Image (cartoon, rainbow, N blue to C red):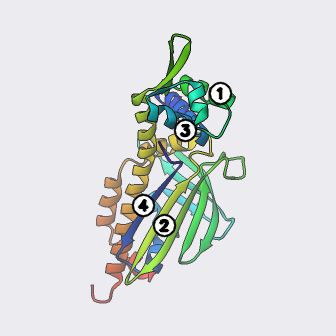
Amino acid sequence: MTQGHIERELSIDAPIDVVWATITEPEQINEWWTDTAQIDLHPGGDGRLGWVSRATNEPMTVPLRVERFEPPHHFSFRWCHPDAAAPTDANSLLVEFSLTSDGQGTRLRLVESGFDTREWTAAERDAELAKHEDGWTRHLATLRQHAASVAVGAEVR
Amino acid sequence: MSAEAADTEALWGAVADPSRRRVLDVILARGEATATEIAREVPFSRQAVMKHLAVLDRAGLVSAHRRGREVLYVASPERVGAAVKSLARVADLWDRRLSSIKRLAERAHREGRPGS
């Protein structure tokens, strides 16, 4: 009926090091997911992912712990575990990014797992977080306005 | 927690266990089944089947009705659909993030090229 995980693959017309930077650098993560991301980018590193509610202006953060950090191929982390607890496969979701070079471009694979081993609250929390995100349109508008994307292009090279 | 969130919680809890999903799958495949019939198709005991049925029933995913001396379980397509939709919604979130990752990386690559 339902699998306990989500799998996606896509091709990106950019070299693997550019895609690696996009998925691992906190300033980049803030462009496609969070409002505030802080991560110690090494195996076992801790971090916090943050969003500000559009409705109430209240910030909320969730903890994250890096599992694999192997540039430029494997980045994975656990999240959605209770704040006070260490993340395990019974109390957190595991997000795994795998990158492979594909000619001039990159093949990205994403797996989020743990929906069936973890208590449900992760999925509902994710949906809750989505309500705070209000606006891939907002992000797109910001990107268009800011020539910072040009600076980003220079930095990630 | 809102009533809707509590309801989603019950759904997720019910389908979280792979053995419980297996029980539900047997009922979906057969249309209706007794606990004994289900137990014949799964690698765990009838007692375990009964426990899973109780959780599925509480979540509204299955309901029991009597036919003579037998108790038959049927699935609720609406509730099953809601559980599947819930997971699909989470998948949608990742689709949107992945689209953004693609766009950002491709733009960074294009605009980093000399002379662009």
Q: CA distance from mark 1 to mark 2?
A: 48 Å
Question: Which chain contains the residue that carries disc 1?
Answer: B
**Disc 1 residue type (three-letter):** Lys
Q: Which residue is mark 1?
A: B51
Question: Which chain contains the residue that carries disc 4?
Answer: A
Q: Position of residue A79 (x, y in %)?
A: 60, 53
Q: Residue, x 49% and y 73% (percent of image)?
A: A99
Labels 1 and 4 touching (C-beta < 8 A): no
Question: Which chain contains the residue that carries disc 3?
Answer: B
The answer to whether A17 is drawn above or below residue A24 in the figure is below
Q: Depth-wise, is mark 1 or mark 2 nearer the camera?
A: 1
Q: Secondary structure at mark 2?
A: helix
Query: Label for residue A27?
Result: 2
The local crowd at label 3, few if under 14, some if 14 to 19, many if 20 or more residues have their Cα within 10 Å, is: some
Residue A110 relative to residue A87: left or right: left
Q: Which residue is mark 4?
A: A32
Do marks 4 and 2 share a subunit?
A: yes
Q: Depth-wise, is mark 3 or mark 2 nearer the camera?
A: 3
Q: Residue, x 54% and y 36% (percent of image)?
A: B12
Q: Which residue is mark 3?
A: B21
Residue A115 relative to residue A81: left or right: left
Residue B75 relative to residue B71: left or right: left
Q: Earlier in the sequence, mark 3 or mark 1?
A: 3
Q: Depth-wise, is mark 1 or mark 4 nearer the camera?
A: 1
- Front-lying residue, B55 or B49: B49
Q: Residue lying farthest top?
A: B68
